[in-house]
Structures are given as C-alpha cells and as structure tokens.
Image (cartoon, rainbow, N blue to C red):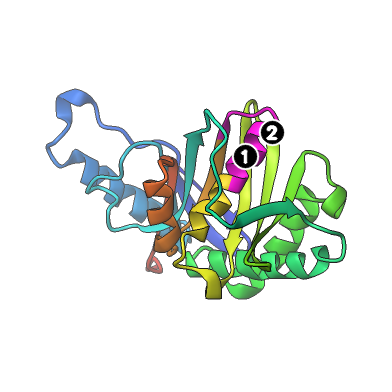
Amino acid sequence: MTVADDNGTLAGRIGDLRVDALHAGQGHEQAARDWAEEWCAERGARRLDIRLTEPVGELFGGYHVRGQLRMRRVSSPPELVDGVTARTMTQDEYPEWLASEKAAYIGDIVRAGALSSEEAARKADRDFAKVIPEGLSTPDNTFLVLEAAGGRIGTGWVKHGYLPGVTYGYSLFIQEEHRGKGYGRAAMAAGEQATLAAGDSMLMFTVWGGNEEAMRLYTRAGYHVMEEYRWIGLPCSAT
C-alpha cells in the first residue's frame, strides 16, 4: 500500500491484495479491501487506484474503470473496408492533428475521472513532448491519414517496438460524422497493417474509462484485456 501525490491529488494504490486459498470465499477479501480504503483515507488520500490482471469480479466491481490495456496478435495483413485507403500524414497536416490529439487525450483523462481538465492539459503537454519529441519525424512512429470517397475520414498513430514485437496504438480516430459505417474497424486494420510492416506481431491499445463504444469495438475485433485500472473516491478522514 502506498499514498503519493498524483498531479496534485493524494492517491492511494493497492500493490497487492490476496487471501490465502484456505480462507478464500469467507468475506476476508472484502474486509481487506475495506481496510485498504480506510488506511489510505487516514493518510489523506482522496482516491484509491488499483491495477488488475484478472477479471474484476465482484470485489472491485463498484470501482470506476480508469483504463484498459488491450492486445491482439496480428498473424496476417488484414483487408481495409472497401473504399478506404491509408496514407502517410503530411507535414502540413501535422499541427492540426497534434492539437486535435491533445484535446482528445485531455477529454479521455477527464472523462475517466483521473484528473481535472487543468491537470490533464499539463499532463498532455508533458506526454506528447516525451513520446514524439521530433514530431512527425520521430523514429519508429507511423502517422496515417484514412480516406474514403475522396475525403479524409480519420487518422492513426502507432509506435513500433514499444515492447519486443509489440506496436502500441496511441490513436486510431474516425471523425464523428463518419462513424457507424464500419470505419472504426478499418482504422484498426490500418494499424494492424502498419504493425506487420514494421516487423511486429502484436498490436496493443489503451482504452480510457467511459469510452464504452471503443471497448465494444475492441472486444468484437478480438482485443483482450491484459490489464485494467480502476479507482474509487475516498471520503475525508476525520481527525
């Protein structure tokens, strides 16, 4: 158990919570969870975070989903939806794309309940400066523009070699007016094609809490939850 500052908010974190098999199923799990919440609240934490690598079950079912890490093995180049093409983003298109990506990233963080809008904006500036310091020329990154019927319908951004053999999908985005037409799967297919072209064999995404539409899409496409991050607000501890 730890309590530490997280972008201006004291947050507790459960490193491990297990009950011996001999005592499982007797209510000890809930008692341990309740103790962890109280322990963190007593030390000033306003939020408790957990990282799960197994199905959430009932114990943490009441915690809010902050984000999920999903992954799928890509064995053969997928076909794009008929009429959809993917091309490399140009330098002229990059500034508008970057501003849009930052805004979407901030919105995801705030919607998941992780940070305030001001804190999320500062985090976005730091994170983007770190992961793409050279912009469009940053090595091992692919920036795509998706087009259909002669017009732009979305964008994609993936990072190759994020882990050995793994490409990380930072963003596969379909413009709102073009959603509901199967283009979301086309964007994922473009990311999978880029994954194989770079020599990787798995594609991984983070899905923020509150984005149920994306979660359903990834589930249908065979992307399994590898890790899930959840949180719950804690009351002020009486002194």
The magenta span reads: 190-202
Q: Amino acid at mark 1?
A: Gln
Q: Amino acid at mark 2?
A: Ala
Give the camera-side residue of 113 and 78.
78
Q: Which residue is mark 1?
A: 193
**Which mark, residue 99?**
none
Q: To which residue does mark 2 refer? A: 197
Q: Residue at x 71, y 32 (%)?
A: 198
Judge the density around disc 2: few (<14), some (14-19), many (≥20) Cα neighbours within 10 Å. few
Q: Quadrant of the N terminus?
A: top left
Give the distance between the C-alpha atoms of the residues marked 1 and 2, in whole angstroms.
6 Å
- Residue at image point 43% right, 64% down: 210
**Image side of residue 106 versus residue 97, left or right:** left
Please give left or right for residue 158 compared with residue 129 in the image: left
- Quick check: can you spot residue 167? yes
Left or right: 228 in relation to 88? left
- Quadrant in the picture for the C terminus: bottom left
Under tag 2, what secondary structure? helix
Q: Residues within 10 Å of mark 1 (few under 14, many from 20)?
A: many
Rendered position, 56 above or below 47: above
Q: Residue 48, how many percent across, how many down?
A: 43, 55
Does the residue at mark 1 contact the one at mark 2 (Cβ under 8 Å)? Answer: yes
Which residue does the image show at 44% across and 63% down from the upper left?
A: 211
Q: Please tell me whether residue 207 is drawn above or below residue 164 in the rendered image.
A: below
